[in-house]
Image (cartoon, rainbow, N blue to C red):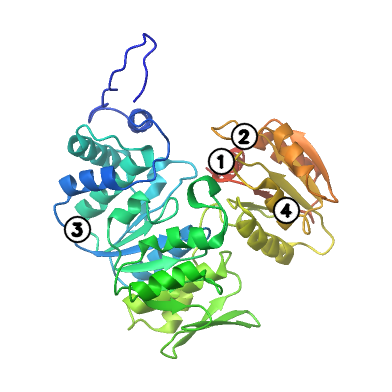
């Protein structure tokens, strides 16, 4: 509940159907006392008012520490190419809130969001919802009204207590389990794995995309008799000259092109999930679809000379993948210039350590958003890591990026990374927003 300047406590007034999307989003930020509230009771209460029974359509829930957005994008493309109607819900967004909800591959309009917000507002009555919870329920309303056959839902934080988890999954994907959001999920993979495994349901099919699942995930799989497709056991990935060969549990094989700029394990998991859902689609068709999938902000190339990429990776696990990609893309005679900006609750030392082997020069930018680190605070954290390369400090991502481009030669590579906020500012600076 917000507190007014005159000292009285009053409920903020809902903007109404004639308000703008920005007015609604400001309202969503004001109606719950905390940004994150890890519980499902309030969301379930409103969900039951909106949907007395589970909406029709197959629900695929995607959780994991990293690689969720890539898995959603790949599965969405595969289902659309198979002739299915598909709704996707992801978070956070890069430039526009509308990116969070897609119907058949297209972002929804302001009007559709506002209409859904009005429905949720009418249903919630005196129940407080966080910004994310309200938006999640609104996404469900939009997908239900659209009547799509398949719902692909990306978990926002964790899994067990995430608002997305109020809908039972018909199939689940867990892309990875690693350390992030320690204050909410715990500081080790076993505890975090238990939270991620909360999206599983008894007897459903599930895909675990990484090679080494925590015991806590496997225990939940066994307890709920989940039909798990597990990398290295149920399906295999083997390197080839121009990519990787993916072999399904039934012996079907397909090629994943090496040019796909997405986490390989997430791409493969989406293909395995799709094969479970639509087994009659041939492997060549799957391979062709995957070869063209791109995700804004995921090793996205925005300039050619010097080569400039942006990536939303913000934890050590994501940074290790990014370091491999940068190493492969690095020109033989060029230097790698990294523009880095981060949020205060992230493991800066772990990220910098993961990237230090491929970076020649650091350009540290400040973030002015909530929880954003200024460049001096970021530099102080980096001083704790024995990084053998020089760094410079700038007041913003845009200033750091402009400096990196001024210094870069035609053979250099510039990588901008560290958070969604970092990439959003860079894309806006470059006119890619």
Crowdedness of circle 2 by 10 Å Cα count: few (<14), some, many (20+)? many
- Whichever of callouts 4 and 3 sits on the residue coming sooner in the sequence is 3
Q: Is residue 186 above or below residue 67?
A: above
Residue carrying label 4: 305
Q: Quadrant of residue 49?
A: top left
- Whichever of callouts 3 and 2 sits on the residue coming sooner in the sequence is 3
Residue 167 or residue 258, whichever sits in front:
167
Q: Are marks 1 and 2 in contact (CB under 8 Å)?
A: yes
Circle 4 or circle 2, nearest the eye: 2
- Whichever of callouts 1 and 3 sits on the residue coming sooner in the sequence is 3
- Residue ID at (21%, 45%): 45
**In the visual, does 120 lie left or right of 134?**
left
Q: Quadrant of residue 154?
A: bottom left
- Helix, strand or loop at label 1? It is helix
Residue carrying label 3: 55
- Residue ID at (78%, 41%): 406
- Helix, strand or loop at label 3? It is loop
For the question of whether residue 213 can be seen, the reply is yes
């Amino acid at each position: 509940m917000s507190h007014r300047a005159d000292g009285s406590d009053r409920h903020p007034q809902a903007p109404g159907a004639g308000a703008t999307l920005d007015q609604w989003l400001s309202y969503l930020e004001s109606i719950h006392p905390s940004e994150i509230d890890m519980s499902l009771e309030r969301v379930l209460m409103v969900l039951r008012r909106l949907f007395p029974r589970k909406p029709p359509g197959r629900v695929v829930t995607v959780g994991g520490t990293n690689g969720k957005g890539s898995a959603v994008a790949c599965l969405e493309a595969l289902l659309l190419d198979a002739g299915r109607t598909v709704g996707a819900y992801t978070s956070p967004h890069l430039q526009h809130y509308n990116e969070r909800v897609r119907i058949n591959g297209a972002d929804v309009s302001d009007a559709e969001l506002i209409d859904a917000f009005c429905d949720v507002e009418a249903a919630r009555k005196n129940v407080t919802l966080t910004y994310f919870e309200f938006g999640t329920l609104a996404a469900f309303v939009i997908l239900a009204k659209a009547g799509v056959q398949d719902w692909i839902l990306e978990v926002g934080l964790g899994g067990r207590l995430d608002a997305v988890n109020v809908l039972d999954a018909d199939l689940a994907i867990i892309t990875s389990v690693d350390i992030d959001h320690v204050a909410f999920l715990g500081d080790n993979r076993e505890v975090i794995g238990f939270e991620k495994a909360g999206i599983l349901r008894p007897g459903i099919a599930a895909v675990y995309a990484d090679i080494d699942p925590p015991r806590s995930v496997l225990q939940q799989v066994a307890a709920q008799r989940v039909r798990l497709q597990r990398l290295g056991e149920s399906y295999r990935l083997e390197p080839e000259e121009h990519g990787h060969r993916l072999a399904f549990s039934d012996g079907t094989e397909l090629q994943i092109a090496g040019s796909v700029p997405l986490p390989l394990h997430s791409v493969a998991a989406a293909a395995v999930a799709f094969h479970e859902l639509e087994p009659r689609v041939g492997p060549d068709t799957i391979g062709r679809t995957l070869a063209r999938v791109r995700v804004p902000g995921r090793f996205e190339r925005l300039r050619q000379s010097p080569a400039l990429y942006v990536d939303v990776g913000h934890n050590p696990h994501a940074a290790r993948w990014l370091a491999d990609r940068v190493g492969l893309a690095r020109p033989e005679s060029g230097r790698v210039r990294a523009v880095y900006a981060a949020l205060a609750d992230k493991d800066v030392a772990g990220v910098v350590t993961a990237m230090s082997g491929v970076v020649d020069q650091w350009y540290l930018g400040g973030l002015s958003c909530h929880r954003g680190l200024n460049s001096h605070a970021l530099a102080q954290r980096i001083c704790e890591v024995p990084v053998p390369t020089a760094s410079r400090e700038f007041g913003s991502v845009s200033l750091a990026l402009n400096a990196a481009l001024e210094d870069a030669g035609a053979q250099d590579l510039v990588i901008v990374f560290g958070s969604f906020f970092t990439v959003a500012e860079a894309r806006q600076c470059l006119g890619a927003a």
